[in-house]
Image (cartoon, rainbow, N blue to C red):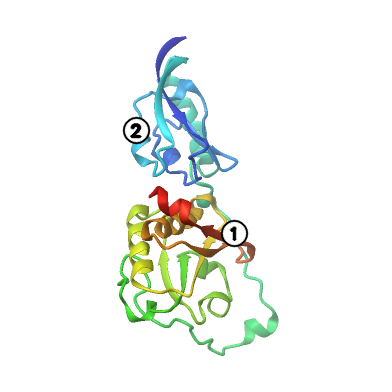
Amino acid sequence: MAVRNVVKIDEAKYTGCGLCATACAEGAIRIINGKATLVSDTYCDGLGACLGHCPEGAITIEQREAAEFDEKAVKTHLGYAAKKVESLFACPGLATHELRPQQSAAQQNSSQAVPSQLSHWPVQLKLVSPTAPYFADADLLLVADCVPFAMGDFHQRFLRGRSVAVGCPKLEDSRYYIEKLAQILQANNLRSLTVVHMEVPCCSGLTRVAREAIALSSRPMSFDDVTVSLRGEVLRSEMVEVGNEAVNRV
């Protein structure tokens, strides 16, 4: 073995977004049990193409003794991976699931429209104005955009009586989200903040957005962090406190 450049993953910083795995053309990084893992030194060319895709700075390059990069082995590896791309390299949130709607006969036969609980427009976090009147003294709901599709009772259970901002922490610029939410917090005296996201690891990035936005706004507060399963069930709900210590670090 020779001393060469190989990627290093800091598990303490890794949040489970999976962006490093999708960015690695050689398939050297794999998501295992919700954590990014270097599958084999042989598959890592040490060029660090994955570095710029990690929002947490959890990926670095280190020099150490490692097996030589083997392009032939990579091709074999990728050929096998192509058959199992969802389970090997992609974020767990991309795995295919067939979910059959569970409805009673009465629900299936009912044609009665259910009224919307949406109180304002727009709803996308990128589009809303921090000084919009619907945020003043509001109970704010920050929700991942897949949640309303998974939850049949989303409007009644979460949206009713709340102002809402919607976003996807995997597909959008999380730093922009943090700054925009911080502006909303600074411009308004919110009564409460509720964050609702799916159970897949990348979606939990919305919790980090809320934490960092609160710290950036210099307004310590708590928020309810709700995790929803792919079938629309609430798996857990916990209160997250962002206090003065987090604010002082920013």
User: x, y percentage for residue 71?
Assistant: 40, 21
Q: Closer to the camera: disc 2 or disc 1?
A: 2
With respect to residue 149, does 160 lie above or below? below
Answer yes or no: do the residues labelled 2 and 1 have beta carbons within 8 Å? no
Q: Which residue is at a point 44% across and 73% down the rendered structure image?
A: 190
Residue denoted by label 2: 49
**Which residue is at 42% across, 54% downward?**
247
In the picture of the structure, the residue carrying the numbered disc 1 is: 98
Depth order, front residue of 75/204: 204
The image position of residue 227, as x and y in percent, is 58, 61
Viewer-closest of 225 and 244: 244
- Viewed as shown, does residue 55 lie left or right of 15? left
Three-letter amino acid code at disc 2? Ala
Amino acid under label 1? Glu
Label 2: how many Cα within 10 Å (few below 14, some 14–19, many 20+): few
Q: Which of 178 and 90 is in front in this view?
A: 178
- Residue at 47 percent across and 44 percent down: it is 18
Q: Which of 82 and 196 is in front in this view?
A: 196
- Which quadrant would residue 174 be assigned to in this image? bottom left
What's the CA distance linking mark 2 and mark 1? Answer: 34 Å
Q: Is mark 2 on a helix, strand or loop?
A: loop
Say which element carries label 1.
loop
* First-in-chain label (2 vs 1): 2
- Farthest residue toward the top? 1
Location of residue 35 by image quarter: top right
Q: Where residue 80 appears, x then y in whole percent?
A: 52, 32
Q: Which residue is drawn at 59% across and 59% down?
A: 98
Residue 244 x/y as whole percent: 46, 55
